[in-house]
Each structure stands twice: as C-alpha cells, then as structure tokens.
Image (cartoon, rainbow, N blue to C red):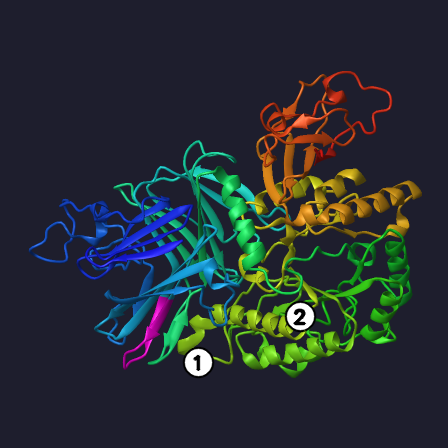
Amino acid sequence: MRIIYQEETKIFHLCNDAVSYIMMVLPNGHLGQLYFGRRVNADKDYSYLLEMMSRPMASYLWSDAKRFSLEHIKQEYGVYGTTDFRRPAIEILQGNGSRIVDFRFKDFSITDGKPVLEGLPATYTEAPEEAMTLTLFLEDEVTGICLELLYTIFETGPIARSAKIVNGGKEPVHLLTAMSLCMDLPDYDYEWVQFSGAWARERHVKVRKLEQGIQAVDSMRGHSSHEHNPFIVLKRFGTDEDLGEAIGFSLIYSGNFLAQAEVDTHNTTRVLLGIHPSGFDWKLEPGESFQTPEAVMVYSREGLGGMSRVFHNLYRKRLARGYWRDRVRPILNNNWEATYFDFTEERLINLAKKAKECGVELFVLDDGWFGQRSHERAGLGDWVANPERLPDGIEGIAEKIEALGMKFGLWFEPEMVNKDSDLYREHPDWVIETPGRHSSHGRFQYVLDFSCKEVVDEIYGMMEKILGGAKVSYVKWDMNRSITECYSHALPADRQGEVFHRYILGVYDLYERLTSHLPKVLFESCASGGGRFDPGILYYAPQGWASDDSDAVERLKIQYGTSFCYPISSIGSHVSVVPNHQVFRNTPLHTRANVAYFGTFGYELDLNKLSEKELQQVKQQVEFMKKYREVLQFGDFYRLCSPFEGNVTVWMVVNEERTLAIVGWYRILGGANQPYTRVRLQGLREEARYEIEGREGYYFGDELMNLGLITTDYTAGEEAVGDSYAGDFDSKIFLIRAIDD
C-alpha cells in the first residue's frame, strides 16, 4: 500500500495489491483523473493518459491553447460552467448571484490511517498501517473558499472518498451541490446495476446497459428509502459472480441521495454520488465548513462476488462498531405478529416461556407498550410505560424475562409523534411541517424535527430514562414515515435548505449518544423494514430489518440483492407466521428457517400456537443456528444461483479456514419429470477432502467447485416413498466439512 507523488509530473498514485488510482494536477490547477482499476506499476509516469484534442464547438480556457477544454477532460471534482457542461460535483451560490468557482491545487498531505468525519458515520481504522489517506487542498481565489478532497486507500482494497468545503472568505455563500464522489471513466462499456423496489420488496437487482445521457437512482424522501439503495455497480459486459471487472459505489449516508452516471456523446462516463442537490442549500458563513458524507469505491476483477466480499469485510469490521461487531447475534422472538397491540404482561410472559423452552435467547417487546398506544393513531412520542398493560413498568417486565434466563429487548420509534400524544400537545412546533400549508400524515404519524437539538435532547432524555433504568439488552429502532412538507420552525428562511441534512445529523447524534452511553445494548434498525437499510445506519446499529416482508420466498430476492453490498451479519432475518401477511403464502417451516439462517435469525410468531411436531422443528432450528451462526454471520458469502434468473436460488458461506461450508438451496415451484441438477460451489480448498452430511464418501474441493454438488431429487423422476417433502417452496441445507488428514 502506497501513496506516491511525482513532483515533476504532478501525478498522485494510490495503490495496494489490488488497485491503482491515478490522478494529476492539470495545467489550469484543477485535478484530472487518469486511471482507476487493476494495479499497475507504481513508479511509472502516466501523464500520457491525459488526452486533449481540439473539437468543434468546444469552449477553451485559453486563447493560445485550443485543446484544453474541461468538457473533454476527465476530472476529479468537476465544476459546471467553466468549459465543462456536465453535471457538477460542486455548486456554490455567491453574493453576486454567480455560481462559478475555480478550485486550484495548493497543497497536499499524506498520513497513515484515516481521519474521523465529525458528526458523520464513516469507515475507520484501528491501526495506522491499515490505510493511508491523501488530502488534496484546493482554493477558489475569488471567494477564498477552500476545498479539501480526502482519499483513503485501505490495505484490503477499497478507497473511501469525501470532500470538505471551508469558507475562508469574507462573505457568506450557499452550497447548492456537494457530492461525495465524482469519478470520470474513459468509456461507457458497462452495465449499470441498481438495487430497487418498494416496501416489502426492497433491493431487487436491476441491470441495464449504460447509454448516452443520464442514468440515476435517488431518494428525496428524507431517508435512503425502500425504493432505491445508495449503492450502484458498474460492471463490464460478461462479468458474472466469479469473473470479470466490476466497480461498486456505496454512500455511507441515510438521507436524500443521488447516484448518477452521465455518459456524454463522446462516450465518457461521469459517476456522481452524494447528497441529493434538489432542495439542498447549505449556508456557509465565513469560517464555517461543510463535510460531505463518505463514499466507498471497490474495484474487483473477480466478478460481483469478489466485489461483494470486499464490501462485506470492510463494512463488517471497519464500519460497524462496538461490543456486538464481532459477536454472534442472539436468537430472538418478537411479539408483534403474535399479539399486535393486544397484549398483557401475563401474555408476554407466556410467550417468553415457550420461546425459552425452544432455546430462544432474547424476547423483544414491540409496539404498544407506551403512552396510550392501543392503536396506531396515538401514543408516539410518549415514551413512558402504560401501567394498564405493564403494571410494573419496563423495569418489571425486563426483570421477569431475565428471571426466565432470557434477555429483554424493546421497540422504539423515536423520530415520530402522533398528534394524539402529550408530546405533541406540549410542543406542536416540533413537527416538520410548512407554515400555512396542509400537513400530510403517514400511518397517522408525523416526523419530529430532529434538525433541532432541543427535540433530540428531549427524546434522548426519555429513552435514556427507560433504557438506563431497566435491564434492556436490545433496541429495535423503527422509522415508518417519509418526510413531507419539509420545514423547520427552528431555522430561518435562508437555512430551510439545510433541514433534510440536519435531520439525518440529528438521527446520527441520537444514535451516537445512546450507543456510547449503553455500549452493550444491541441496536437494530428497522425503518419500516428496509426503508433505511444503508451503510450510515450500520455504523451505529450492526444489524437491521432488511424488510417487513418475512415470507421466505420473497426474502430470497430481498436478501440476495442486499448481499451485493451488505454483510450477512447485518441482515435481520426471521421465521414468520403463515400464511404470510404480505403474500398469504403457506411456506413450509423448514424453508422459512433455511432462508432466515443466512442473517441474524429469530421468530415473529406465537410459538404457543404451533403443534408439538412444529415445536420440535423449532428447537432443532435454534440448535442448528447456535451451532453454526458464527460461520453463517461472519463467513465468506457466495451467490451461486440467482432468484432473478430461474426457479432455484443457491448461496453458501465458508469459514475462514475453508473447513466448513453451508449451502442454502431453494426451489420456488415443484415440477414433474425434471432434469438432473447440480451446482458448482465456491470458496473451498481445491486439494482438501470434504464430506457432505447425509451422504457417503468424500469429495475434493476442486471436485465440488468444478463438477458440482448434485442437487437432483424426486422431481427428476417418480416420487419415492419416504421423501420428506414434496411440494412448492422446498429447500435444503447442505453441510460440508473438511476431513481431518
């Protein structure tokens, strides 16, 4: 791992064993992009990669240099309007109405490790040798505004980028666009991959060819959203899971975002990633600064799977933090689908007793324990236990659950309020709404103004009182409403463009205070299921509900798409009641568990309503998860067959030593007289001998990876007597162990 500066050519070269990132100071003082991809020789002069040509209708900076046009030069942080007509990385409105800026290189620094981004989630290092950081200092001489571009290259491959804008001038300005990453690529021979959907079908994989014009995904909902994830991939044609080039772009942010690729008519591609500029307007007074969120780039020549495993490793170990980062996650039982709002303390205890009998480790009390919360129209904001339901308060129920030998968890939705609540009646101006305009609701709730510190302080006080006074080991943090009529009563008119971003900073502040004060409490994010499943929240909560849809068949696509960027340890996955409440599908219990194993695992049903045979299955499932959850949650993950391409989905995990592999095989619909089938495995040691539980003999690693694992069953012929299951939504788990020599 090195960062090299060539004084003569003014070239910077960041490299490790996997990648090279090369840029240079252009003749006008701007920064030009030369190369990003597979590592190349670090000591070579690559200035020849700066190509310039006189082109008709181009605009040029200098009258005596009719080849230097920023329209046709690849740049690091492009600015619209100074011969560059592409979408800009930065836009600043000045006092005279101009939006033109001219950031020229002044200096640089190279440091070991990685700096902290104040108030923002970001990747980090635990030792200086894990990464190196290049900071480039640029200045617009007319306004005195300084631009700091940060590049951190990790020893393991990824590159993290962000920008800091400092108003070193004498006049206030308005920052209208401030992207985290601008990346100009020399061609457009890529397929664009996005991860999109809606509530209950989040992060489905969508692929299309890059074309001239703009391709983009975004969110303007105040959160990263169910609709589009702040993560895209550009992959070469023919790139699959195992082979070929791919570049992943991920934004560590939970608010409004834009991920965009602009292909010009000369077939160069500009990737922009950062805060959505629409509605964004940040006033910078003299001496003030603005830090953009961090973006992470991963280059892979080992296909999409290689890219994903780099993201998994980085986000699992150097984005997630705290006590639970490296610990296996407790198996839980959540009461919501068992009781909804209809519960008493006695009923909760009965649910917990049965869960304990099955080996469950954590009982979670969901919505309805506070204020007058007997329905969704009331109570949010009043974080005080309802004595009619919990006569001994949260302290009492927590003590009783602990006495059973289980841990106790609790649901909150701290960012929301009902109008039928004491909090709203006392502070109606704490709601985000525009004066004189209709105020919309979502699920009869309204968004608290977390851009205001007073509001965050109040919610923190209520939550800390509950969590600090009771034996609460887990918090489920929900957020069931997008922001509409965005306006803060606490900010002046010329700062209303700051509300969306300040809101997310307030969310981060509350998370930071609570997790710092309660370091051993496991926080799980649950923004209406998957509505804020993003790297920003992962920094504070090491796991999140990937979706409110817990049907196993639907979860195949959701978990498959999620795995392109996010580690398996972050995916909240549970066994739910059937018929499922979203699709009313009767999925077998074994398949529900087989899907949920590849995540954090738990149950969302009333175990008291299961038959004795089903309870025995549950006990076996819990035992299995306890035995193998370390490899399931922290092993290397491989996608083998896509649910978007056929009737069968297959994935697997392998432990670090390559001595244990677990394969999940899932078939949506059964069939008659089907072909023989097998699937090629990945990640095994070629020369090692492996045994497959339930089968005789042994298999070499190269055998399983090249010839494949036979998955043929009764559907390839006539159903045999004794087949355990015959029907739709079938699944199997294959346990593969290395044989000791």
Task: State the residue position of label 1.
Answer: 492
Quarter of the image with the C terminus in it: top right
Q: Residue furthest right?
A: 612
- Camera-nearest label, 1 or 2: 2
Q: Is residue 172 magenta?
A: yes
The quadrant where residue 348 appears = bottom right
The quadrant where residue 483 appears = bottom right
The quadrant where residue 452 appears = bottom right
Q: Is residue 141 above or below residue 210?
A: below
Q: Is residue 466 above or below residue 677?
A: below
Residue 391 placed where, x, y %?
A: 88, 75
357 and 421: which one is in front?
A: 357
Q: Please name the amino acid that badge 1 sits on.
A: Pro
Which element is circle 1 on? loop
Q: Residue at x 29, y 45 (%)?
A: 264
673 and 524: which one is in front?
A: 524
Residue 219 seen in the figure: no
Residue 67 placed where, x, y %?
A: 13, 49
Residue 425 seen in the figure: yes
- The residue carrying pointer 2 sits among few (fewer than 14), some (14 to 19) or many (20 or more) residues within 10 Å by Cα, namely some
Which element is circle 2 on? loop
Q: Give the total of numbered labels.
A: 2
Q: Please name the amino acid that badge 2 sits on.
A: Pro
Residue 171 placed where, x, y %?
A: 29, 80
Q: Is residue 738 magenta?
A: no
Report the predominant secondary structure element of the magenta stretch.
Answer: strand
Q: Residue at x 67, y 39 (%)?
A: 659
Task: State the residue position of label 2.
Answer: 519
Region of the chain picked out in magenta, as a range: 164-176
443 horizontally vs 35: left or right? right
